Image: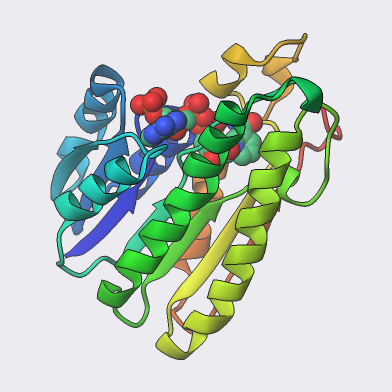
Amino acid sequence: MKRILITGASRGIGRAIAEKLAAPDVTLLLHGRDTVALGETCKSVQSHCAGVIKLIHDLATQKGVSNLISQVGGDPLDVLINNAGIAVVKPFREVTLDEWNQTLGVNVTAPFLLMQRFVGQMPPGSNIVNILSIAAKTGFANWSAYCMSKFALEGFSQSVRDELRVHRIRVLNIYPAATNTEIWDDVTGDWPREKMIAAEEVASAVAYALSRPANVAVENVTLSNAAGNL
Ligand SMILES: NC(=O)c1ccc[n+]([C@@H]2O[C@H](COP(=O)([O-])OP(=O)(O)OC[C@H]3O[C@@H](n4cnc5c(N)ncnc54)[C@H](OP(=O)(O)O)[C@@H]3O)[C@@H](O)[C@H]2O)c1
């Protein structure tokens, strides 16, 4: 039986990953904050997997992260998927310290603490998946806080990847272009949602990377929009 933990599984890319990875030999540990939305994800996967555990915690706070860690417990973890994320999009002069800290907390500190805490219970052949972004490689006007967080996670995870090779734990980084999820609901501007890639495509990339033999690491997958950045 495999245990797979997915943060931010209540909607968007996290939900699509949960639906893609649900299998009879898998227990899904699904995290979110919105109990109703997380309940919907659980409902859609429960008949396809061995079990579902619901984890409702705020990852912007260290207390929320510690509570999640306690609830997951010490049993072996085969896959940790750091997916939860927020996007504050505005000119950098308008970003408040609170928004900066929230972005760092959810997008960087939580993945750091989860990787650090769980790696000791991840057997050889297990995987850490980080949902980064094309914004981990390129800066975009008005996306400074978001790009800061994704660049930070990129540097951190590259280093961790190298440290974990000796333990045969793979660190798989996924870099999606604009993907049509609710994260865009709060982003000002006229974004062509219908031209964005689908969350299911990101989930398929994750499933592909995880499906490779243990001696092969599909370490970096970039999902660009064939039409260019939107
Ligand atoms: N959509 C894109 O264009 C795109 C492109 C590249 C990378 N990404 C990355 O993909 C990941 C998922 O994004 P998405 O597009 O699926 O966004 P989404 O639909 O807005 O979903 C975000 C998820 O993160 C969770 N989350 C947000 N703040 C949280 C907090 N304080 N504590 C705990 N959980 C929190 C949400 O939980 P609740 O709703 O339950 O609060 C939700 O499950 C993010 O890391 C994002 O940066 C997205």
Total number of numbered discs in the rendering = 0
Res 205 visible = yes
Quadrant for residue 125, please give it: bottom left
Residue 53 left/right relative to 194: left
Relative to 223, say whether 42 is above or below. above
- Please, which residue is most extreme toward the bottom here? 166
Which of 7/20 is in front? 7
Residue at the image position 31 percent from the left and 28 percent from the top: 33
Residue 154 left/right relative to 171: right
Quadrant for residue 1, please give it: bottom left
In the rendered image, which quarter contains the C terminus? Answer: top right
Q: Locate residue 50, reporting x and y percent.
A: 13, 50
Q: Locate residue 67, reporting x and y percent.
A: 21, 46
- Please, which residue is most extreme toward the front here? 97
Relative to 173, say whether 46 is above or below. above
Q: Locate residue 153, reporting x and y percent.
A: 60, 56
Residue at the image position 32 percent from the left and 66 percent from the top: 117
**What is the basis of the colouring in this image?**
rainbow
Which of 112/222 is in front? 112
Relative to 207, say whether 85 is above or below. above
Residue 95 left/right relative to 198: right
Quadrant for residue 17, please give it: top left
Residue at the image position 56 percent from the left and 23 percent from the top: 183
